[in-house]
Amino acid sequence: MNTDIKTRFYFFSGKGGVGKTTMACATAIYNARAGKKTLIVTTDPASNLADVFEQSIGSSEVPITGISNLFGLELDPDEATREYKERTLAPLRGVLPPESLKIIEEQLNSPCTAEVAAFERFTDFLQAPEYEAVIFDTAPTGHTLRLIQLPGEWSGVIEKAARDGSAGQTCVGPAAALAESKVKFDRALDAMRDGARSVFTFVLRPEATSIYETRRSVAELKKLGIHSQELIINGVYPADACDNAFMLHRYIKQQQFLGEIEKTFALPATVVELHAGEIKGLPALGEVIRQLYKNPVSLAQYRKGSLQRSEPPAATEAGGTANPDVSKLLTPHNGSSRAIFFAGKGGVGKTSVAAATSLWLARHGYKTLLLATDPASHLAEVFEQVITGKPSLIDGESNLWVAHIDPVQAAREYKDKVLAECASKYDAVRLKAIEEELDSPCTEEMATFEKFIEHATSTGYEVMVFDTAPTGHTLRLLKLPVDWNRQLEIKIFTTLDDSQADKATKARFEQVIAMMQDSDRTTFSFVMYPESTPIEEASRAMQEMAGIGVKTGLVVANMVLPASVGTNPFLIQRRQMQQRYLEQMNRRFQAPIVNLPLLADDLVGRQQLAQASVLLYGNGKQAI
Amino acid sequence: MTNKVTLYEPTLCCSSGVCGPNPDQALIRLQDTIAKIKELGVETERFTITSHPREFTQNPEVMKLLQQNQLQALPITEVDGKIVKTGSYPSLEELRGFIT
């Protein structure tokens, strides 16, 4: 092997649904066709890589059919956990009694193991000398930033654990054995910081939330010392497709946002236009490769060449839809409260739909809490007011309370709580040691989960609406009560200490599990737009939730093009595609489906949310 | 004379259990105990069954206890190579008694 070859790493990040996977795949194909041995890795637990290449991929490197030099891999936390478990158990097999082995195997199902195992695999691929190009297609922003921060954090934890030596145990293993891992984590961070080796590309769309999220990520990465960043602006409407008032209004909005992007980011930026059809299969990716690498148009060039119109014409009102009456699925019954979860692929409009739904309920007189569990939530932008970890009343409303789970703040509270419990029992030196151990990255995961349980078991609201993180991480969060419950069962069984506290925790978890499984108290909903990948992702997630006894109660089809906008071949083709997928949704989901049309403007502010809520659920004259 | 305390422990997340669903008071107490006996100049070692399987399998006494009592045998406390307690963690007073 030529030792001069240094692997180049390409990270693709951005809000859900902006086209990260498409851009990552196009980059991978482009590199492979240029003769470079290339690997594309997805770190998204709900990856769509297999859908794009139309072949199964899995957790070890496989050649991509039809493209020489290209290999693919899905970093599946479950699979990584299985491998990690196998490595751990191998030396014990045959020496330990089978009953003990079985219990240890169960203990290794701890949620911590999955985090650690997936993360270890991620850092493995940051030193892949056998490849000339490694492309990371990452999970939506919030969780990806976390993954990128982890090498530094774990490195610090290992250093501390080794130094004070009192216990020397960390969630990733004993400190003594981790010197090697620390070197690996440090090297990972070095590779990401080195502009000659790594480039971070943010994919965004010309819309407010996407710009906001990108701005935040760009700043976060700079804080980590990662400066090599680029932008791809995806989904720009071709000018000639916007020949009716509704689309022209949207077009002009996009042009304004493009101007804002140019002003906000001093980063190289490439423009990619929206396609009439879906980007699926290799020929469609060829067009993306052309726009990205063969004939790229920079944002500055594009802005000079685009037609400028200053007066946005009045937008035509999007056509109404005849949705089934689903009010019974939203309102509380029999004196118990109702929890409504909105899940789905990134970018499908979970936040908008959750916000509209909670406003609708609040205005029908139900005391409602809207809670975002996504660390990258943009509820504050939607409601145009500050949202914190504590429920705050929305200005001008009397029944609508909104909060989000901020992992950093949750971790701080959790630390304070644990330390307060210990304060009377131990001296300052011991407390310091406990405090250092609480700096472990696991604490954030644990604290986020604690907050979720706290809200889910609170009794102060008649309805709780959960605006969740993109699919992969939400499934994990929602399955955690089941996983931890199992862990506590083992712990109660194997130890005598503290079982009272464990039993109390177990009872809380069981309460949440029972609530989620009861369709009189919980409506589990999926939001999607009528295209292949969001439907596939929701179907898979629906099955997984069914596996823990949670049925899907409602489906929302978002961004449906109204018939009235079909004024040219581009829009007619897009609408036909959507109609095909709407029919498919009818076949694949047993739950009632409500449509929300594509609206002239992004959903920001209560007035627009109220309009959207009426389009979704009617004006509420139906019996509630 | 030097003493060495070795603990053979079940699978833990971190040493104090603070990052699990319930901070484990027994483990926090243990950390305290370990720190105090260290101050007496006693060397300590902690092995968990999943992170240090070899330390378990190469100790016939430990393996014998595991065969007999399964995982309930853990944690096992050894002082200078002799097993002094099984099934639960020793208190500071107990450990002081074991150490000569």
Image (cartoon, coloured by chain):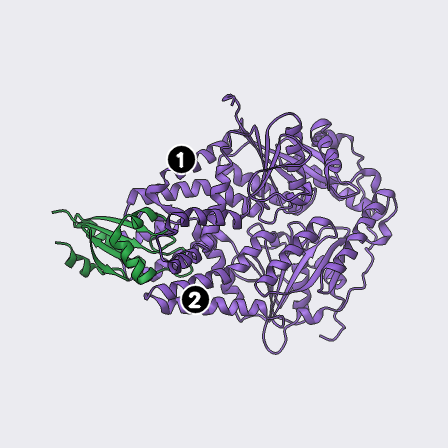
Chain colours: A purple, B green
Q: Where is residue A178 in the image (x, y as percent from the top left)?
A: 37, 41
Query: Upstream in the sequence, badge 1 or badge 2?
Result: 1
Crowd tier of the residue under label 1, counting other residues whose Cα lies within 10 Å: few below 14, some 14–19, many 20 or above: few
- At x 57% / y 55%, what residue is drawn? A474
Query: Would you name the residue on which mark 1 appears?
Result: A183
Tell me the residue that label 2 is attached to.
A505
In this picture, is A519 found above or below A209?
below
Residue occupying image coordinates x 65% and y 37%: A25
Q: Do labels 1 and 2 share a chain?
A: yes
Dot 1 amino acid type = Val
Give the residue type that dot 2 points to.
Answer: Thr
Q: Is residue A220 above or below residue A130?
A: below
Foreground: A154 or A237?
Answer: A154
> Toward the viewer: A401 or A335?
A335
Residue at the extreme front of the image, as rendered: A94
* Mark carried by residue A335: none
SS of the residue under disc 1: helix
Q: Mark 1 lies on which chain?
A: A
Real-space CA distance between mark 1 and mark 2, rounded to the nearest whole angstrom: 37 Å
Q: Which residue is drawn at 55% across and 41% down?
A: A60
Residue A589 in the image: state x and y as whole percent. 71, 61
Question: Which image quadrant is residue A284 in?
Answer: top right
Q: What chain is tagged by disc 2?
A: A
Residue at 60% x, 31% y is: A38
